[in-house]
Amino acid sequence: MTDLDARAVAILRANDRGGYTVPTARLYPFQWNWDSAFAALGFATFDEPRAWRELQLLVEGQAPDGMLPHIVFRHDDADYFPGPAVWGTGRTPPASGISQPPVAASVVRWLLEAGDAAVAEPAARALYPALLAWHRWFHSARDPDAKGYVATTHPWESGRDNALDWDGAMAAVDPSGIAPYQRRDTGHVDPSMRPTQAEYDRYLKLVEFGRETGWNPERIYRESPLLVADPGLTFMLLRADRDLLAVARSLGLDEGQSELRAWIERANAGVRELWSDDVGGFVALDLRSGALAPALSSVAFLAWYAGLPPGPWAAPLRTNLERMLGAVSFGVPSLDPAHDAFDQRRYWRGPVWAVVNFMIGCGLAEQGEQVLAERVRSDTSRLIETAGFFEYFDPLTGAGCGGADFTWTAAMWLAWASPNRREVR
Ligand code: DGY
């Protein structure tokens, strides 16, 4: 074990709150959905039962309609805003009213295939119904017209809070009338690395809107001031559907298999609507205005990870990936550096994120793009070796940004970026 491996293990242990892991102390003091799924991949490299425990506690937050919340609070904490009272979901354990990128089923497949069958099989079998119900929720609540792409109704649900993808839709959200509030995030992290105040006001307006509907998915889809089809959510769900189907097959579970096959087929076709010839890639589509986003975000490169059938999309997307990698010292930047809105340290408007790199890199490797896959993996290693286990990184200088001692960055080191990694597949 290298010093960095030991440090990564120590971060996961230190962020463990007794079966679930906080993304980092103070800035994010609860259980976050996709953070937890990636944390489980890290734990699996040295403590397999603890990896499963992470996922078991995550599904304890499941709503009656199948939605797996983006935050399971369990308690209140003055370090964070907005807490459980603002969400007002009235559930136990307290949880938020929106979801987050569905990567948990993919993690379950990795754990099942790599792990000790005596531990992994019963654990995966027990989680399967909750994951199937969650995917069903995504397909009905966020794609009720069966278009084959998933919409986000809140930037937080996409996991990419301040991405350029939501700019047009966010401009149309009128934040007037929101209850007075005090941000907590900017007390923990340099404000130049966080979303702006104008964005935060709109995030809260959208929370108030959801709460006023009683978190009614039908009303939210039809009436939310923000409704944007997201290539990130769509690709991660497509991948997770494939992985959940593989889990069902390997465990001999019949329930859900035909639904999963139908969702996969629908997404393979529907995601083509998110293609932009102008940009040469998959971009967000504002479902209220009909506008496609004007620039590439790194989630476009999850097309390989999603297992999208080969087609004319691959060559231009590959060219754009090579161009974007050529423009930075460390890939993959979350926004195209050629766009005016690129901001090398501001959260999802430029910085590199280890978990996105992991998914991009795995997808490229699986589809035979070994050179590009290795560039993405080795850039991630160099970032962590140089800067440490930060939340995200400046693609031009390699400086660490956001929170330090970050759970998912430590997990990605152990599972993928470390020279001693245990292959996740
Ligand atoms: C935050 O508070 O910054 C989170 O991204 C919302 O989940």
Image (cartoon, rainbow, N blue to C red):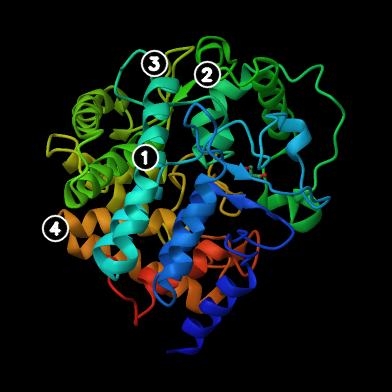
Sequence-earlier tag: 1 or 4: 1
Residue at the spot of label 2: 217
Q: Which quarter of the rendering shows the N terminus?
A: bottom left
Tell me if residue 238 comes above or below residue 305 in the rendering.
above
Dot label at residue 144: 3
**On the picture, is 264 further left or further right than 124?**
left
Residue denoted by label 1: 129
Q: Is residue 343 left or right of residue 126?
A: right
Q: Which sits earlier in the primary sequence, circle 2 or circle 4?
A: 2
Residue 257 appears in the figure: yes
Between 192 and 47, the residue placed more toward the observer is 47
Q: Which of the two residues, 334 or 123, is positioned nearer the viewer here? A: 123
Which residue is depicted at the point 64% across and 67% down? 404
SS at badge 3: loop
Q: Is residue 134 above or below residue 36?
A: above
Q: Name the residue carrying label 4.
A: 368
Q: CA distance from mark 1 to mark 4?
A: 33 Å
Q: Amino acid at mark 3?
A: Pro
In contact (CB < 8 Å): disc 2 and disc 3 = yes
Q: Secondary structure at mark 2?
A: helix
Q: Amino acid at mark 1?
A: Pro
* Contact between labelled residues 4 and 1, with CB atoms less than 8 Å apart: no
Is label 3 in contact with label 1 (beta carbons under 8 Å)?
Answer: no
In this rendering, which labeled residue sits more in front, label 1 or label 4?
1
Q: Earlier in the sequence, mark 2 or mark 3?
A: 3
Distance from the alpha carbon under mark 2 to that under mark 3: 9 Å
Left or right position of 183 against 364: right
